[in-house]
Image: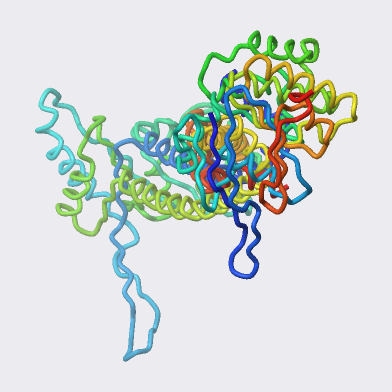
């Protein structure tokens, strides 16, 4: 018979106490696993978006908000700058991008950047307000690789329209239907599959037709710039465009994602520090349970020492018990943490998909075991300090 | 074999101090069978606890085979408990979560020697409990539990057995069986010191020591020796 078998036999006769002690640790690990799982899903979502947008740059009009003050009085803000970009600036944007990327891609002579200009207008279809987007149908699919036409076809004709999935559903618009935008007629050529983005709520028509329909010839609202290389120095291209072309602001989508990621990491670390408090509570819980266990088992400890157990062996016995509590607590914490993540994750970060992360199981068991062993230290030490005769006398 | 030299034990301090043992001296030879008797609170249990290192003394010395043992540290006392000295208690003190045979194996487990069931079962057979080895203490009678405790004490092959009222919780018949077992163990060569309230049990030993108020008042051979 080995020492751990003695402990296992003892544990099996006190299952409830072991379970309650494990529960104390499990609460702590549950919060950690829950937070990590949610944070992981959130980060995954950002990574997915990053993958989706690829090495893209968003070019928008350079509008600055100025604070208007008189003395110490704040009189509000004033936007300075145009709300549109002149279409004539597109060649300059394209040239800047090509110039920066050309030395890195000497083997190809074709365009290294694709520009997808857009014009956004607020309008109505059958009395319902929607956003209509004018796109260059030749290039839009090149920057939105995730677009899929679920019904009908893509737009080829100047009076074709492509409806977002929600627009189609809410307004009952289907391929072949006619719609009217500010007096100009369009035929719905197709409906996009759901993208999970704002595109689901929009109607896409050829840029030139929309510009004419709304008297905005030569004007665009934004330009998506995609570098035709996987490792393009996209921030460098954005900086180059900002320096070369006036009246516009170019931002690498990656930067936006990185900033989102930074925010996510901050939130995660704050939540993790809070979960440290629950772990500390769990630690005291286990210490308390183990102290109670020492007092309760004073006689057993005395018996063991009377028949030859050394102090080290008594500490070992409590350590084995702590390991059992830790393993059980870790398993419970992992299961409960995942349930917590599945239940609360979608409320914390909208649209995320929670998944089991197997690598967190050993982490959960490790943390729970560490806490349990640390919490057992003092009670185990105390257990060795009694005189054997005292442990019988105190009964 | 064993020498107790002027041993005293006090509990508490100042005006609350209680003297449990007051300058007790005695010597026990190899193969002796000694009974210690005395009224409650006379210091009988305290004396065997101190001899076995389960309790500390306030002053005096204990020598085993000429070597002082009362000043040993805990690790050194553990070595004594793993072969030299074994205890048998009035309350049996078996671990309730283990079966009889596992309780008997316990000293071997702690000593790090090979603890197989056959050794423990053989011990249980020697005390007449061969068929009850896989029962837990709660499923055994008082007499059976004490036999398990005796088998546990014997498994480490101790030279000195200290027993604190081993028949205290038993009826006369069961007590007599246990004492017959003690007699057998003594004949096998074990030195035995037993504490008892029962004069009949004490008379089975070869030597009787009477304690009163922590002092030895009588130390004589019993009728078992004198006839």
Query: Residue A135 location in percent, x, y?
Result: 39, 41
User: Quick one: which residue is furthest to the front in this view?
Assistant: B226
- Count of labels shown? 0
Nearest to the observer: residue B26 or residue A101? B26
Say which residue appears at 57% left-offset and 47% top-offset.
A386
Query: Residue A4 location in percent, x, y?
Result: 57, 25
Tell me if A187 is positioned left or right of B122 in this view.
left
Nearest to the observer: residue B137 or residue A85? B137
Query: Residue B217 location in percent, x, y?
Result: 70, 47
- Quarter of the image with the N terminus of chain A is top right
The color scheme shown is: rainbow
In which quadrant of the rendered view does residue A51 lie?
top left
* Looking at the image, residue B122 lies above or below residue B222: above
User: Quick one: which residue is furthest to the bottom in this view?
Assistant: A71
Say which residue appears at 78% left-offset and 48% top-offset.
B39
Nearest to the observer: residue A62 or residue B177? B177
* Looking at the image, residue B183 lies above or below residue A165: above
Observer able to see residue B201 = yes
In which quadrant of the rendered view does residue B181 lie?
top right
Observer able to see residue A124 = no
Query: Residue A109 location in percent, x, y?
Result: 14, 26
């Amino acid at each position: 018979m080995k020492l751990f078998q003695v402990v296992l036999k003892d544990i099996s006769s006190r299952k409830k106490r072991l379970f309650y002690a494990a529960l104390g640790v499990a609460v702590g690990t549950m919060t950690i696993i829950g937070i990590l799982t949610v944070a992981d899903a959130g980060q995954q979502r950002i990574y997915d978006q990053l993958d989706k947008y690829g090495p893209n740059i968003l070019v928008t009009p350079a509008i600055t908000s100025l604070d208007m003050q008189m003395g110490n009085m704040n009189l509000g803000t004033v936007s300075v700058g145009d709300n549109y970009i002149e279409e004539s600036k597109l060649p300059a944007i394209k040239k800047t991008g090509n110039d920066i990327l050309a030395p890195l891609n000497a083997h190809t002579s074709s365009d290294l950047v694709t520009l997808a200009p857009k014009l956004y207008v607020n309008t109505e279809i059958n009395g319902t307000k929607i956003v209509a987007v004018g796109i260059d149908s030749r290039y839009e699919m090149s920057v939105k690789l995730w677009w899929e036409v679920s019904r009908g076809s893509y737009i080829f004709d100047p009076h074709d329209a492509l409806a977002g999935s929600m627009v189609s559903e809410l307004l009952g618009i289907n391929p072949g239907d006619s719609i009217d935008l500010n007096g100009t007629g369009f035929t719905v050529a197709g409906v996009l599959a759901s993208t999970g983005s704002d595109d689901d709520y929009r109607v896409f028509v050829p840029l030139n037709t929309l510009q004419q329909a709304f008297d905005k010839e030569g004007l665009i609202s934004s330009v998506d710039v995609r570098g035709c290389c996987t490792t393009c120095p996209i921030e460098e291209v954005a900086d180059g465009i900002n320096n070369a072309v006036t009246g516009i602001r170019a931002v690498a989508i990656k930067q936006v994602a990185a900033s989102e990621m930074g925010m996510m990491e901050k939130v995660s670390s704050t939540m993790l520090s809070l979960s440290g408090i629950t772990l500390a509570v769990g630690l005291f819980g286990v210490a308390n349970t183990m102290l109670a266990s020492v007092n309760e088992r004073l006689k057993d400890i005395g018996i063991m020492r009377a028949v030859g157990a050394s102090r080290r062996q008594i500490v070992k016995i409590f350590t084995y018990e702590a390991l059992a509590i830790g393993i059980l607590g870790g398993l419970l914490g992992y299961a409960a943490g995942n349930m917590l993540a599945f239940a609360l994750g979608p409320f914390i970060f909208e649209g995320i998909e929670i998944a089991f992360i197997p690598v967190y199981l050993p982490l959960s068991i490790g943390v729970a075991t560490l806490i349990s062993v640390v919490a057992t230290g003092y009670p185990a030490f105390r257990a060795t300090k009694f005189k054997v005769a005292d442990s019988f006398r105190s009964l | 074999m064993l020498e107790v030299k002027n041993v005293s034990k006090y509990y508490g301090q100042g005006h609350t101090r209680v003297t449990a043992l007051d300058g007790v001296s005695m010597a026990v030879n190899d193969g002796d069978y000694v009974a210690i008797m005395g009224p409650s609170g006379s210091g009988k249990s305290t004396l065997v606890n101190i001899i076995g290192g389960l309790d500390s003394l306030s002053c005096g010395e204990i020598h085993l085979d000429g070597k002082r043992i009362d000043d040993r540290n805990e690790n050194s006392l553990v070595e004594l408990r793993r072969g030299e000295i074994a205890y048998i208690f009035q309350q049996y003190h078996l671990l309730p979560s283990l079966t009889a045979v596992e309780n008997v194996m316990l000293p071997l487990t702690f000593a790090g020697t090979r603890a197989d069931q056959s050794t423990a079962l053989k011990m249980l057979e020697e005390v007449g409990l061969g068929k009850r080895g896989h029962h837990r203490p709660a499923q055994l009678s008082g007499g059976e539990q004490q036999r398990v405790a005796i088998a546990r004490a014997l498994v480490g092959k101790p030279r000195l057995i200290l027993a604190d009222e081993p028949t205290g919780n038993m009826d006369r018949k069961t007590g007599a069986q246990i004492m017959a077992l003690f007699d057998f163990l003594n004949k096998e060569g074990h030195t035995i010191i037993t504490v008892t309230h029962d004069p009949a049990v004490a008379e089975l030993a070869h030597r009787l020591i009477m304690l009163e108020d922590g002092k030895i008042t009588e130390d004589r051979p019993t009728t078992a020796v004198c006839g």
